[in-house]
Image (cartoon, coloured by chain):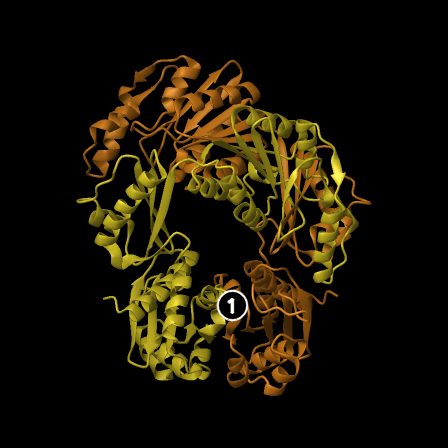
Chain colours: A yellow, B orange
Amino acid sequence: MDVEIITIGFEILSGHTVDTNAAFIGSKLTENGLDIKYVTSVGDNLEDLEMVIKQALNRSNIVITTGGLGPTDDDITKKGIVKVFRRNLIFHDDILKEIKSRYARRNLEMPAITQNQALLPQGGKFFTNKNGTAVGICIAEKGKIFISLPGVPHEMEQILTDEVIPYLQSLKAGGFTKITTLHTIGVTESKIAEMIKPNLKLPSGVRLAYLPSYSGVDLRIHSVADSNDDAEQKKDSVKKQLESVCGKYIYGEDDDKLETIIAQLLIDNDITISVAESCTGGQLGMLITSVSGSSKYFLGGILSYDNDVKINILGVDKEIIEKYGAVSEECAKAMAENCRKKFDTGYALSITGIAGPEGGSDDKPIGTTYLGLSSIHNTYARKFIFGKDRYANRTRAVYSSLELLRREILDIK
Amino acid sequence: MDVEIITIGFEILSGHTVDTNAAFIGSKLTENGLDIKYVTSVGDNLEDLEMVIKQALNRSNIVITTGGLGPTDDDITKKGIVKVFRRNLIFHDDILKEIKSRYARRNLEMPAITQNQALLPQGGKFFTNKNGTAVGICIAEKGKIFISLPGVPHEMEQILTDEVIPYLQSLKAGGFTKITTLHTIGVTESKIAEMIKPNLKLPSGVRLAYLPSYSGVDLRIHSVADSNDDAEQKKDSVKKQLESVCGKYIYGEDDDKLETIIAQLLIDNDITISVAESCTGGQLGMLITSVSGSSKYFLGGILSYDNDVKINILGVDKEIIEKYGAVSEECAKAMAENCRKKFDTGYALSITGIAGPEGGSDDKPIGTTYLGLSSIHNTYARKFIFGKDRYANRTRAVYSSLELLRREILDIK
């Protein structure tokens, strides 16, 4: 079935906000076999919104809007729904109760204006919002499905994933599409292409996309066929080909993340870990602890941003820093080894580098980074030269550090 | 004049590519006083594209498309232009020459297919592409301006900035627009609305938007008027009203970020800082060190995720944890104070909480977080109860922690 996405808000039109909501919805629905035909962004203007909703209902089977469901005056989506569908807003006691209890749990007083969030279109179906006060609204009428979600990304994402997708699945709205994404790290896009291309056989109806990011290159297989089994089979044949050619770089697929793969490896092997970070300032620890339950294997770390901290708190030998510099193989090794001993963990990872945009030299250009790893068996460090961008360099460093650990645990050369 | 942006490509609809082109164009044109009314994304399908272009020309004065100008079969934008404007494609020798010389300069042979790039609609005006082979196309007809740009971001951005904006300026297409965003933290969207509403006087032509995120609520003032001075004046009058009502929550405007504001405060006061993080696992350190030059004031920190680390490395009294728990005012205070002494910094910040989704209790529900601050003058901790989402809780905690420091330094009660 054809889908149209409508994103609402002047901040999107004026480029203040990049429209990541449309991309999230587009990607989730495409994965579920639905075809997005149009995305339309429109401002917080009732007349324009009404026109855009009518046009979308006219040309698409399913219409999903985001934004404009807040309690303030510039939130006009419910007014638009009232006009298009000619339905009244009804006050929902149960929803107000739920909102009040959310505030109570946080020990906050509910502002009077928030009561507006319980005013909802008559005859609608509502989707629970676990992270906010704006519930999702669904109206099915004349063979069309209209769904309105809040614009705050994590609220929209939760409702879409937990409520909207299962609802659309229950209507059997999707076609026969199978999509799998293989996640690689430690290899460039061109290098993968070079490895894959000579032998790759892509069945008809299958597309392969290379999606590079700072955390690695994703390989996305998109298979469309006349039957579910056929789509699955074609997808699997390409997946097998890719695995046979570049399997050692593939750390997971679909919802897998490098940090959750590492989590499972550490839990399976009953090993703990600690970190010593310099230029990343906590980003590695943050990534590791972004996984719920990480307290099972992550004990802690030292942010040794300043050299005196490396020496006095982490116990790196002053002479190492004087002789080789803080950004050196020797320093990275000392950081990792001292960290492991201090925290008494099975592994320790260290990162020291020049994130930029300042601080580079001919000898050690911006992006020069040493990643250390220490275990009871051995301690080593690897040199990387990333790019010129501070954010990119720090992000690449933390993912490469986890990849170092993955290869150590799995003994991948 | 009203503008409509059309972005072309299946990869946008399927969420594979986030539509940053629309945001870039929207922001540049808005800065130049033009009003974006709609953004429409459509796939590489000739029929759909034709329909969307016609509709845009119907309802907007200026239409700008991106994408689909390449030499291959799936690039259909020129075909769409031919259909909508009923013009032939003409071969432009001078443009082919220019393209050939680009290849020659890079010592590359021009692929035969690239010749297509010199086939352009009759009677059009063309914008030079310094970074690629797809020139920008402009057709002015019946009082409407239609502009077609390539989809590769750095090519589109160069043509828009160097050619399209000056062209539109020469037509005096823009009005007079002034935009300012005030950044607040420590207060909810509804609470701000409650404070502002009773007295706010919005001059005609001025819009106010509330833009909430985990790092606070942005207030965006968008002022349009008949003259530059008038637009500026109206914007300033609203800004002053907002500052007088909720000034203590406003930490900066436009490109300011809380972490850069903090950076400046610490540099101005010549004070250093360190952090002791539990549930955020390094996110506070990461945020602080995301600022280039943060080594001037940030010395380092301890990630005391495990309670033994809090006791053995950070030196928190074991009895405090046994008596009050690790998530307690007492523990947050001890973490901050010990951290400050250990790193010998002017300030130390601490964070300990239950980020979720596991680990809550009736007494301390998920989201319960204590933020500590220690200086040579005093040490205290504040209790927050955020929500249920791990990512949101951690992000709110780090921004609230920096806000605690901002208020301490500026002595805001």
The residue drawn where x is 60% and y is 29% is: A53
Name above or below for residue B91 compared with residue A299. above
Residue A142, percent across and down? 59, 26
Q: Nearer the viewer, residue A204 or B104?
A: A204
Q: Nearer the viewer, residue B271 or A57?
A: A57
Q: Of helix, strand and loop, which one carries label 1?
A: helix
Q: Which residue is mark 1?
A: B285
The image quadrant of residue A370 is bottom left
Left or right side of B317 for B142: left
Name above or below for residue A186 compared with residue B204. below
Q: Residue furthest right?
A: B198
Q: Nearer the viewer, residue B353 or B261?
A: B353
Callout 1: chain: B
Amino acid type of the residue that numbered disc 1 sits on in the rendered structure: Gly
Residue B124 in view here: no
Residue A49 in view here: yes
Left or right side of A115 for B374: left
Q: Quadrant of the C terminus of chain B?
A: bottom right
Badge 1: residue crowd in 10 Å (few <14, some 14–19, many ≥20):
many
The image quadrant of residue B257 is bottom right
Q: Quadrant of the N terminus of chain B?
A: top right
Residue B238, percent across and down? 73, 43
The residue drawn where x is 37% and y is 22% is: B78
Residue A277, percent across and down? 43, 71
